[in-house]
Each structure stands twice: as structure tokens, then as C-alpha cells.
């Protein structure tokens, strides 16, 4: 068959287009909006805020928080978040409650952005049902186009609801939580996948806690986006109890081990007398405020590096190391929580970890969790977390020790100090290191050298 000159030109253009489509995409483009945003901003620590009469920007900052999450349209809160004296002002995110993109929604958002400079993100509808997602997606698309430098995201339900709860009406057939997360990601296209879980109710840890962390993590990694979570800091809401120091730390550090790169406390303060939060109903900081301030400093130190790891290099599970407890006068092994798995030999070989053991002592949840990470240059890291915690118990009273046995060829291992943000070379003895951690707390290690990403970015 003969082709005209015009047809040949058209064919050449088509071949060139197909070639370009098949070319590898630039690595920075692959990371997408969310990953670029996370890497270019300090580790996000915020608290849901909706009562202007109890807020003070310096007090808010004193809790170790670096971003306001303004949950209701109340100009008084923005006046606190955006202090016209620049050293006191903080960046803010705003919760958009509407379901549809209207001129009123556009106008309100634009007015807020003009009146109170400092917005860095938009949270679109807390816990949306699937039936609402198409309308919300239009709002999010408009925000991405209008504010290309700001984060656009939503907050998903936790696991445990009925299909109708997630869907908005009874779907035709089963509608599992994994499908809800898939629709959440594919319809809304959030820059980060965020969800909330409040695991401490009546003195016990939710049996679905680790499973939920894993499900959200897996969905986010599949979508190639970062993932964030809410942290329980309330009492009285839906049966929740105010976490102890060890419980607060357990939430924070287990989430870090799963690769979460941003947190929002639920909640900062409330005027309702039946509730407690980081502030009591009278607006005064309570013990949890000061515990949060301490742990948030540690998160900021570790977060400088963790923003560049993101958990994407590890397997789609986070190994769990059970300890032992006393039962009917006998010492027995602790159970694997739902959604967790052991450290396999294959993964251990790749990370050059032969074994991790819980040292002498007994206690329910006196266990270890191990987050596995890689950086852009294939450097290998792990975070070891002491999961032992209890209601009303300090981190010091749930301290535990662990032994990590490394491959014989490992000659260098380093730790990023959560207390100081400095790197430390550790002594390896007979291919082993011993790690002692307060209850609920974790440390971040690198195998092979002491070069952690993000430490020279000034954050």
C-alpha cells in the first residue's frame, strides 16, 4: 500500500507519540503532587480546631503543633491561626464541608485565602460516603487547578462499618472496606490518603487497629501517594478514653513504623464539659497536652528523614514480634494482632536482619513492631517500636528491651536520635545490638552508614 506525504507525516507523528507515552516518566513526576508536597514541607502536625475562645497561637505552638486544622468556618479561628505578627502565625488547612462545587464554595475559599495568607492545604469533607464522592471530586479538581502548590485531600472512614455506612445507601452486593478505600482513591484522587481511628475505648486497644493501619497503607502505596492519620486525643466522644503517655506514644510510633507522614490530633480543645482533649473544657492544658508536646518534638526530629522514606520500599506488611505474657500461672506467647505478620527469612535477608527478639519480661502487648523502609538510593532502614502500653500508665513504666541480630556482613549501623535529631553510630557486638525503648516508643535505624535523607534541608 502506498502512502501520501501527508499520511506518512501523520504516521511518524503517531509513532513518536506512542514512543513518548512508553518512555519512563521522570522520577519527580512519579511522586506526584502529594509526595512532592510532603517532601518540601516539615512533617505535618496539627490538631482539629473549631472553638475560637480557647485558642492561642503561642499555646497551640507550645504543644509541638506546626499547622492549624480549622474545622469550621469561624473567622475568629483564622484570626488566631493567621497572626499578623509573622513570627506567631502558623500555616493552616481548612475543612470544606460542602458536597458540591458552587460559586459560593469557590468564593468562600478564595476569600479565606486572600484574607488570611498562610493556607497550605484543603481537607475536603470528613468521612465522605461513596455516593458523595463524584461531587466532592469536582471540588478537589477545582482546588488543584486553582491552588497547585496546596495540598488537596479528604479523610476516610476507619474500618468496622457496615457496607451502607461507607456507601451512603445499601449497595448491590457486598461492599468491603478495601473497596471503599479503592473508590476513595480512584474517585477523589487525593494528594494524600488520610483516615481516622480512635483505638482506645474503655481501657483496651481496638482489635482492628493494626489491620486498619495496614489496609490504608496498602491502598496508598498502590496509588503511589503518601498517607496520614488522625491521632486520638479525646475522652468522652463515642466512648473514647483520654490516652495515657504510653498509649499516645504507641499510636504515634506504630503509625510512623507503617510509613505515615502526617498527623492530626482529634481534638485540640472543646467547651463541652463531658469531653476532654489536649485542653480541658475550661481551656487549660492538661497532662496530655504536655505529653503531646514532648512526643511531637521527637516526631519532628524523625520526620525530617521519614518524609523521604514513606514506606514504599518495604513489603506490604510491617513485621510484628510477639513477646510473652503470664496466663494461668504459665508464660505463653503473645498473639499476633489482626493484620500483622512475622518477619520472614526472605525479608530479613534483604534488610540484613537475622532475628529480633523481646528480652526477658512478660506483659500483654510487650511486643515489637518493625517498619521497613528504603530511600531513593536503595538505602535500607528500619524502625523498631515497643508496642507495650496501658491506660493510665507512663512510657517509663512500660519500658522494654529488644535484641536485634544482624547479618555478619553488617559492620555499620546508625540511629537517628529522636531526642536531638543527630545521627549516632552504634556498637555492634557479635552481630547484635540491644535496644531499650520506653512504652509505645520507637527508634529509627539505618544499615550500612549514617547518612539519613532530609537532615540538611533546614527543617
Image (cartoon, rainbow, N blue to C red):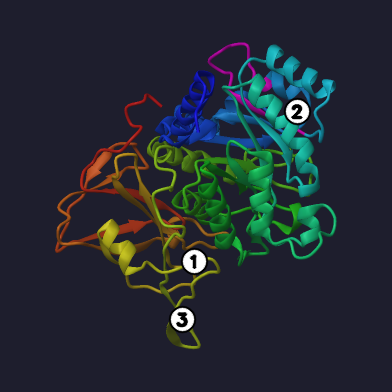
**Mark closer to the chain start, 2 or 3:** 2
Q: Report the side of 413 relative to 138 (left or right).
A: left
In percent of width and height, residue 374 lies at 35, 46
Q: Report the side of 427 relative to 107 (left or right).
A: left
The front one of 444 and 163 is 163
Helix, strand or loop at label 2? It is helix
**Mark closer to the chain start, 1 or 3:** 3
Identified at 69% across, 12% down, the residue is 114
Rendered image: mark on residue 340: 1
Helix, strand or loop at label 3? It is strand
* The quadrant where residue 402 appears: bottom left
* The quadrant where residue 206 appears: bottom right
Camera-near label (1 vs 3) is 1
Camera-near label (1 vs 2) is 1
Identified at 57% across, 51% down, the residue is 219
Q: In 3D space, how far apart are the residues under numbered discs 1 and 2 (Cα atoms)?
A: 43 Å
Specify the segment rendered in magenta. 80-96
Q: Report the side of 365 relative to 50 (left or right).
A: left
Taking the image as drawn, is residue 16 in sight?
Answer: yes
Q: Which residue is mark 2?
A: 53
**Mark closer to the chain start, 1 or 2:** 2
The front one of 32 and 108 is 32
* The quadrant where residue 424 appears: top left
In percent of width and height, residue 89 lies at 59, 18
Q: In 3D space, how far apart are the residues under numbered discs 1 and 3 (Cα atoms)?
A: 22 Å
Rendered image: mark on residue 326: 3
362 vs 145: above or below: below
Q: In 3D space, how far apart are the residues under numbered discs 2 and 3 (Cα atoms)?
A: 49 Å
Amino acid at each position: 500500500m502506498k502512502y501520501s506525504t501527508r499520511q506518512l507525516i501523520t504516521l511518524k507523528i503517531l509513532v513518536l507519540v506512542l514512543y513518548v507515552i512508553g518512555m519512563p516518566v521522570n522520577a519527580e513526576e512519579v511522586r506526584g503532587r502529594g509526595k512532592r508536597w510532603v517532601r518540601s514541607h516539615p512533617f505535618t502536625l496539627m490538631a482539629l480546631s473549631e472553638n475560637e475562645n480557647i485558642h492561642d497561637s503561642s499555646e497551640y505552638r507550645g504543644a509541638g503543633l506546626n499547622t492549624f486544622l480549622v474545622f469550621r468556618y469561624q473567622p475568629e479561628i483564622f484570626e488566631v491561626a493567621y497572626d499578623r505578627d509573622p513570627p506567631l502565625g502558623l500555616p493552616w488547612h481548612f475543612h470544606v464541608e460542602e458536597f458540591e462545587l458552587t460559586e459560593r464554595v469557590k468564593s468562600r475559599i478564595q476569600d479565606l485565602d486572600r484574607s488570611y495568607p498562610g493556607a497550605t492545604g484543603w481537607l475536603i469533607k470528613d468521612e465522605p460516603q461513596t455516593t458523595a464522592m463524584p461531587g466532592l471530586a469536582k471540588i478537589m479538581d477545582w482546588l488543584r487547578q486553582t491552588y497547585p502548590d496546596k495540598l488537596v485531600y479528604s479523610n476516610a472512614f476507619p474500618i468496622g462499618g457496615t457496607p451502607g455506612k461507607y456507601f451512603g445507601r445499601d449497595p448491590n452486593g457486598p461492599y468491603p472496606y478495601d473497596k471503599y478505600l479503592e473508590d476513595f482513591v480512584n474517585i477523589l484522587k487525593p494528594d494524600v490518603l488520610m483516615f481516622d481511628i480512635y483505638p482506645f475505648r474503655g481501657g483496651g486497644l481496638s482489635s482492628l487497629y493494626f489491620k486498619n493501619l495496614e489496609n490504608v497503607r496498602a491502598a496508598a502505596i498502590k496509588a503511589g501517594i503518601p498517607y496520614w492519620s488522625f491521632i486520638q486525643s479525646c475522652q468522652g466522644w463515642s466512648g473514647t478514653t483520654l490516652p495515657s503517655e504510653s498509649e499516645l506514644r504507641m499510636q504515634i510510633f506504630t503509625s510512623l513504623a507503617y510509613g505515615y507522614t502526617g498527623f492530626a490530633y482529634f481534638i485540640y480543645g472543646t467547651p463541652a464539659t463531658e469531653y476532654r482533649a489536649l485542653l480541658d473544657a475550661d481551656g487549660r492544658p492538661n497532662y496530655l497536652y504536655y505529653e503531646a508536646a514532648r512526643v511531637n518534638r521527637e516526631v519532628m526530629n524523625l520526620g525530617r528523614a521519614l518524609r523521604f522514606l514513606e514506606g514504599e520500599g518495604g513489603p506490604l506488611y510491617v513485621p510484628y514480634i510477639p513477646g510473652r505474657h503470664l496466663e494461668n500461672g504459665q508464660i505463653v506467647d503473645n498473639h499476633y494482632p489482626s493484620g500483622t505478620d512475622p518477619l520472614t527469612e526472605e525479608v530479613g535477608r534483604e534488610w540484613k536482619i537475622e532475628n529480633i527478639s523481646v528480652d526477658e519480661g512478660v506483659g500483654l502487648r510487650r511486643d515489637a513492631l518493625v517498619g521497613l523502609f528504603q530511600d531513593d538510593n536503595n538505602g535500607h532502614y528500619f524502625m523498631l517500636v515497643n508496642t507495650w502500653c496501658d491506660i493510665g500508665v507512663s512510657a517509663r513504666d512500660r519500658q522494654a528491651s529488644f535484641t536485634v541480630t544482624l547479618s555478619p556482613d553488617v559492620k555499620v549501623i546508625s540511629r537517628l536520635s529522636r531526642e536531638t535529631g543527630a545521627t549516632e553510630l552504634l556498637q555492634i557486638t557479635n552481630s547484635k545490638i540491644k535496644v531499650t525503648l520506653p512504652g509505645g516508643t520507637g527508634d529509627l535505624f539505618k544499615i550500612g552508614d549514617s547518612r539519613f535523607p532530609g537532615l540538611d534541608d533546614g527543617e
